[in-house]
Image (cartoon, helix red, strand yellow):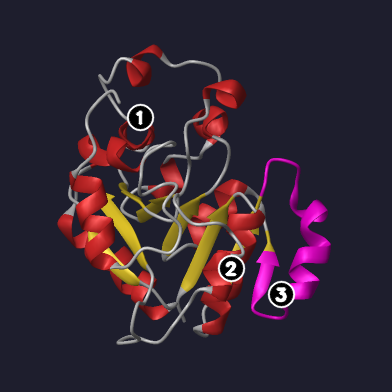
Amino acid sequence: MTTLGLIGAGKIGGSLARAAIGLGWDVVLSNSRGPETLADLVADLGPKARAATPAEAAAAADLAVVTIPFKAVDDVPAEPLAGKVVIDTTNYYPPRDGHVAAIDDGSTTSSEMLQGLLPGASVVKAFNHIEASEILTHAQPAGSEGRRALAVMGDDAQARTTVAEFIDAIGFDPVDLGVLADSWRLRVGTAVYGGGRLDATQVREKAAAEVPGS
């Protein structure tokens, strides 16, 4: 049985958990406040969900998700994620996260920084440009006209494929946009980030049209 391990159990985490359970997966949720604080969410999700610590969720994961405020990424447990694919849903918001000079000047991206913190894992940027509720309400079967598309970016091609397959399975067209160094094309304020319900062609075109530093 496949297990989705979630480091972070907010709105995005909860929606991804529901989507994974819909596929028949098990889910292990965690947050910074302790498993006991997730009792209501786990009860609502049902018997395929359980709560754990972040390290336990990471260890249990066949596919992991980091879905926390970017300012907290230093706390993500690296060792139990070694050898695993890690979906990064985070967004860098300076008013919340504080300014990071290397991101502000374009030297790196937030997802590259997370990859640096998880050297044994394969980080894939995804789900950062969709509202949590839309993960469930915008899902459509493959082949549906106008099916919403979600970008996938990562340095490992096989990891991108793994996440793309998950995205397709839960109801969206995956669009491979390449490596983490280019993930600024999905940052807060871009046309993809704020574009809403875009299809695959629109995601590709809008991402390609972004200008560094704009």
Please name the amino acid that badge 1 sits on: Met
Secondary element at image label 2: helix
Front one among 206 and 172:
206
Residue annotated with mark 2: 17
Q: Distance between the residues labelled 2 and 1?
A: 25 Å
Secondary element at image label 3: helix
Residue sitting at 35 percent across and 45 percent down? 191
Name above or below for residue 107 compared with residue 164: above
Of the numbered discs 3 and 1, the one sitting upstream in the chain is 3
Please name the amino acid that badge 2 sits on: Ala
Front one among 180 and 28:
180
Do the residues under discs 2 and 3 have CB atoms within 8 angstroms?
yes
The question of residue 39 being in magenta is answered with yes
Of the numbered discs 2 and 3, the one sitting upstream in the chain is 2
Residue annotated with mark 1: 113
Q: Position of residue 159 (x, y in %)?
A: 25, 59
Residue sitting at 38 percent across and 32 percent down? 110
Please name the amino acid that badge 3 sits on: Leu
Residue 197 at least partly seen? yes
Q: Position of residue 168 (x, y in %)?
A: 34, 76
Residue annotated with mark 3: 45
Q: How far apart are marks 3 and 1 (CA)?
A: 32 Å
Q: Where is residue 68 in the image (x, y as percent from the top left)?
A: 57, 42
Q: Position of residue 32 (x, y in %)?
A: 69, 40
Residue 26 at least partly seen? no
Q: Is residue 3 left or right of residue 35?
A: left
Bin the neighbour count of mark 2 within 10 Å (Cα to Cα): few under 14, some 14-19, many 20 and up.
many
Magenta stretch: give its range: 31-50
Q: Is residue 178 left or right of residue 18?
A: left
Q: Distance between the residues labelled 2 and 3?
A: 8 Å
Displayed quadrant of residue 133: bottom right
